[in-house]
Amino acid sequence: MQRDFKGVWIPKEIWLDEELSWMEKLFLTEIDSLVTNGECFATNDYFAKFFKLSKERAARIISSLAKKEFIEIKLVYKEGTKQIK
C-alpha cells in the first residue's frame, strides 16, 4: 500500500480519549496515515498483517471504531458479485 509516511503523530483528542483502547488508537493513527482524498481503502487483511493480529481481531477493532463513530465503513464489492474486494 502506497502512502506518504513521515512518522507517527496522534492527535490529543485520540490520545486522551478514554473510550478508545490502545489498539484502537493505533488503528486510527494507521488509518490516518493511509488516507488519500479523504478515504482509506485498506482491508481487514492489511491491518491484520500490519499489526500481526488475526483477521477476525482486526475486523472487531474496525467495527468498534465504526460503532463509536470514529470511522465510517463502506464495503466495496467485486463487480457483479456480493463478494467484498
Image (cartoon, rainbow, N blue to C red):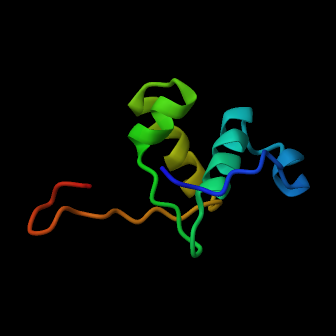
Above or below residue 84? Residue 48 is above
Residue 44, position in %: x, y? 42, 43
Q: Is residue 38 left or right of residue 45?
A: right
Residue 54, position in %: x, y? 43, 25
Asked whether 73 or 64 is in front, the reply is 73
Above or below residue 3? Residue 37 is below
Residue 68, position in %: x, y? 63, 55
Above or below residue 74? Residue 57 is above
Which quadrant of the figure contains the C terminus?
bottom left
Q: How many marks?
A: 0
Point 60% across, 51% down: residue = 65
Q: Is residue 29 left or right of residue 9?
A: left
Residue 41, position in %: x, y? 45, 59
Quarter of the figure with residue 34: bottom right
Q: Residue furthest left?
A: 80
Q: Residue furthest bottom?
A: 37
Asked whether 31 or 65 is in front, the reply is 31
Q: Is residue 37 left or right of residue 4?
A: left
Quarter of the figure with residue 70: bottom right
Point 61% across, 53% down: residue = 31
Q: Is residue 72 left or right of residue 69?
A: left
